[in-house]
Image: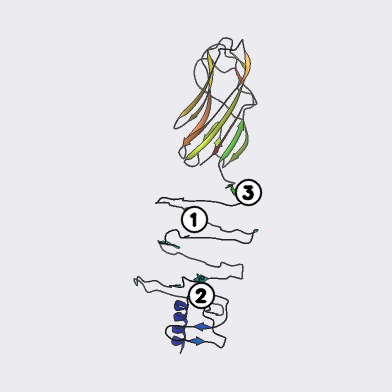
Amino acid sequence: MFKKILSVLLIGILLSGGMAFGATRNVVARADGEGQIGTSAKNWDAAYIETMNSDNMVITTPDNANTVSLAVTNNDTTNNPTTMQITNATTGAGVFIDQNADGIAFAIDSEATGATVFQVEGANTSGQVAKILSAGAGVGLLIDQNGAGVALSIEGTVNGGWLVSDAQPYFLVQADGSQTNVAADGADYTVTWVTETLDIGANFTGNTFTAPVTGKYLMCVSVLLNNAAWGDCTSIEIKIKASNREIINLQGATGYLGDANTTLVMSHIMDMDAADTCIIEIRQTDGTAQTDIGTNSRWTGMLLM
């Protein structure tokens, strides 16, 4: 008798065109005729399964069977009903997928042109629409785009549609005025940065920024030169020096009537690989070694993409 009831139950799930937990308590198996278990009125959309202190439904596929464990097919192209709906009234997981072997835990394959493969909607503005937690050393979310199209698109009206990440690498450092009388021998000297105003990701150490990931980094630097020796030098330059390339801002002494305070400013997008480093250097070609690095000198950088 139990096997007969279980058979009717599974047929009802596969043929009814949908499955909903929490609907009318009856199971209907419909092929050429009709079948029903329970005393409630017929409801072609409902299969209700209730157990006590155990799994509601367990489907096991034999080893090497190479078959689908559970298939739910909806052939109604006229009304476009929901094929499968799971309603969860508790604080637990509505759907829990546990992968114990190598392979894909969850896969969606759509061959329909222009179809939405996966869509998540949230009506509760105080909750989270989608949340991904990774407890292992692997990637929490991997998006692999092998064809033409958009790999990741984030759109919305909240916050103007911006994508905000609290972990985006960013730093802001400042000099303290202790670097004085820069040598005037034409050699490169590293600018020292004593005060770290911000360092998201802890990627700035000493006077060096180290890229945590491969990407494009925006570097902006402003170096205040106090008592710059424009009276007898040829030029003074500052340099953004990274592992892959270096960008120079060279200021000639032509046009200066004598020694003066000067601010040299530059910015550039640097392509950096993971673990690449970047520093700021200064060079005075000749003249008197009297140029000081002022306290208003600042350097900031951030990962763009």
Query: Relative to 70, is 178 on the left or the right?
Result: right
Q: Are marks 2 and 1 in contact (CB under 8 Å)?
A: no
Residue 105 x/y as whole percent:
45, 63
Residue mark closest to the camera, 3 vs 1: 3
Task: Look at label 2 and name its amino acid.
Answer: Met
How was this image coloured? rainbow
Residue linked to disc 1: 136
- x, y (%) of residue 65? 34, 72
Q: Residue 19: which disc?
A: 2
Sequence-earlier tag: 2 or 3 = 2
Q: Is residue 162 above or below residue 217?
A: below
Label 1 element class: loop
Residue 168 in sight: yes
Q: CA distance from mark 3 to mark 1?
A: 32 Å
At horizontal 41% and vertical 63% (from top left) the residue drawn is 101
Give the SS element for disc 3: helix
Check whether the beta carbons of the residues at disc 2 and disc 3 lie within 8 A of each other.
no
Give whichever of discs 3 and 1 has the lower sequence position.
1
The one nearer the camera, 176 or 271, is 271
Identify the secondary structure beneath mark 2. Answer: strand
Going by the image, does 43 lie left or right of 15? right
Q: Residue 242, how many percent across, how many down?
A: 48, 31
Q: Give how far across and how far down residue 297 sits, in percent.
A: 62, 26
- Which residue is tagged 3? 159
Q: Nearer the viewer, residue 101 or 59?
A: 59
Image quadrant in which you'd find residue 86: bottom right
Q: Amino acid at mark 3?
A: Asn
